[in-house]
Image (tube, coloured by chain):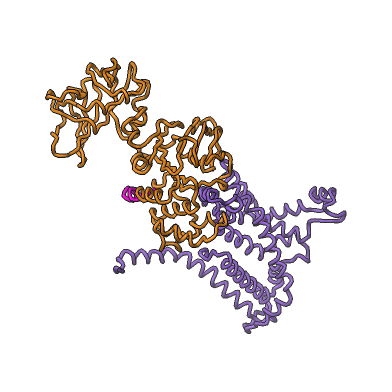
Amino acid sequence: MSEPTAPEDRSSGRIGYLLLLPAALWLGVFFVVPLISLISTSLYDPAGSLELGYQMTGEVANYVSVLSDYRDQFLRSLAYAGFATVACILLGYPLAYAIAFKAGRWRNLMLVAVIAPFFTSFLIRTLSWQLLLADQGWLVETLQFLHLLGEDGRLLATPLAVVTGLTYNFLPFMVLPLYASLEKIDPRLMEAGADLYASPFTTFRKVTLPLSMPGLVGGTLLTFIPAAGDYINAELLGNTSTQMIGNVIQNLFDGGSYPEAAALSVTLMSVIVVLVLVYIRRAGTEELL
Amino acid sequence: MPGSGADLVLQGVTKRFGGFTAVDDLDLTVPSGSFFALLGPSGCGKTTTLRMVAGLETPTDGTITLSGEDISRLKPYRRPVNTVFQSYALFPHMTVAENVAFGLRRTGADEVDRKVGEMLELVELGQYAKRRPAQLSGGQQQRVALGRALINRPQVLLLDEPLGALDLKLRRQMQIELKRIQTEVGITFVHVTHDQEEAMTMADTVAVMNAGVIEQMGQPMELYEHPRTTFVANFLGQSNLARGTVSGPQGDDVAVSVEGTTLRAPAARSVGADGDVWVGIRPEKVFLAKGGSETDDGLNVLRGGVVTDVSYIGVSTQYLTRMTWGQELMVFEQNTGARDHFGVGDTVDLHWRPEHTFLLDAAQDATAGVERGDPE
């Protein structure tokens, strides 16, 4: 019984496209064009330079050479981002849960506290971590006093410092989507779980956790993707052997090796897209796409 | 029969939230296998009572026993009790079948699939097993919630305003359905509602609750015909309450004087009938006659009323008549065709059979339980 569509339906469809237009233009000019430019740069002859100009030679070999040269940094980036994401989940889930269900009249204050770090710049906050983790800082001295850290042990310029910095900087991106997702859950569903013989833990596993999956997946993506490409934390809190792929790309660009830098960027992007797709498929939250 | 077998017994149950007493020293026995309704306006403590039985609230004082076992402080997931929640609280991420199977999976029951299939047949949702709750109508969701609770064969099934979200027609249908299912499975149902018609249609026993205490408990007909408080008289249907003074016994009756007219009420229906009383009569029990006309002996008659309002509602005509002392009384006449119609301004006499009269303690508020425009 499909009636012919009323004329106003079709015109409202056209309005939908018109509303899309500004954003589509913006993305076209500032995303699609640079992306094509990036991909073509990654295929330039690496023998060229900024002064002499580059030749488009379809140099697929760029990919092979950067991958063999920077494999360690690549894997390290994924590992650091992975550790930071897991740490964000472990810290962020209980926090988001507490804000959503237990905070009562403190809820708004706690949300403000989560967002408050954004009032200072990312760079300044990471620099303060440098002070906090410094060799003469109270944290290191306390840990040394407690023999949790050796005599010459340090925190700054270690992988731990980089992961800690990443965790700190991206924690709000985990907490906020998780909170949004948990806050939408009707508390009566948990009562229903308890009423149907589920212990609090089982209720969490069978009801709360599945219903918060969109927030968990969203938070993971918002944390993992920028963390994998980040170079500030590794630069300010790490050392030469904690370099991440972001640092390499930055150095290559600074050194004028545009084709290699572009090839690395494209590779990073592709790897992340593949990881995200696999992750979303595994988490059963395809509706996010 | 209090305390026998598998009864649900509440003794001295009190629940306070801060300084507010939601349930006050409540004593209640729900016989095993009965359909019991807890009826009252919103905020009367009926839902709190239900939640204490479910284990979702802990009583401040008192004990709740089920089949002789004290369950007052048992965790909700350890009680042989299930709830049909107001607005259902179905798990949105599970299919209908998974929702219904939830309780059985937790208790590790066997043949879950077969039992779920049977339950879905009972609530007539067989073909919807694979759907998500959001893809169902309100009435279907209601039946999923019922099936999800019933499948566990609880000793007591608690229903918290289960039909509140349904439209009137569907609600009538589900009332009959619920009653059928209860008879079929024989489980004790405790049904909380603010809808007096719903309570009277379905329940064997109704407890009328107000301000944390039970005003009166009994079969629907007994509550309606023999209200013992002004609250019950007004909340269950409607009542005319006129001020009177008991003048003494008169055979099996009590004589009572209302504004100079002597009326009679059966002594059996005259609770605390001494001195000042409220003389009560249901509007549909009253007949109107042309002012000054002859009436049969032995009827209660109030003369000299003036019709101030007439509402024709099809099945009956509802009159408001102003009496000589200024009070307006309600009269509902069935439109049988055999009765005279009256218009605004007509002078009328009101008469009814003495056995329909009831007397209540004059110390009570005559407007207690009167619905004030908002039925919620």
Judge whether A251 appears above or below B139 on screen. Answer: below
Q: Quadrant of residue B325?
A: top left
Outermost residue to the bottom: A57
Q: Residue B360 location in percent, x, y?
A: 34, 24
Front position in the image: B280 or A161: B280
Q: Is residue A155 left or right of residue B149?
A: right
| Residue drawn at 35 percent across, 42 percent down | B198
Q: Residue B59 location in percent, x, y?
A: 55, 36
Q: Is residue B83 left or right of residue A205?
A: left
Quadrant containing the N terminus of chain B in the rendered view: top left
Q: Residue B295 location in percent, x, y?
A: 14, 25
Q: Main secondary structure of the magenta part?
A: helix
Outermost residue to the right: A151
Front position in the image: B186 or A18: B186
Q: Residue B275 location in percent, x, y?
A: 33, 16
Q: Is residue A265 visible?
A: yes
Give yes or no for residue B170 being in the magenta stretch: yes
Q: Quadrant of residue A6?
A: bottom left
Q: Is residue A212 visible?
A: no
Q: Is residue B260 left or right of residue B293?
A: right
Judge whether B254 appears above or below B180 on screen. Answer: above
Q: From the image, state the color of chain A.
A: purple
Q: From the image, state the color of chain B.
A: orange
Front position in the image: B328 or B153: B153
Point out the stretch of residues depicted in magenta: B165-173
Judge whether A96 appears above or below B370 on screen. Answer: below
Quadrant containing the C terminus of chain B in the rendered view: top left
Judge whether A236 appears above or below B354 on screen. Answer: below
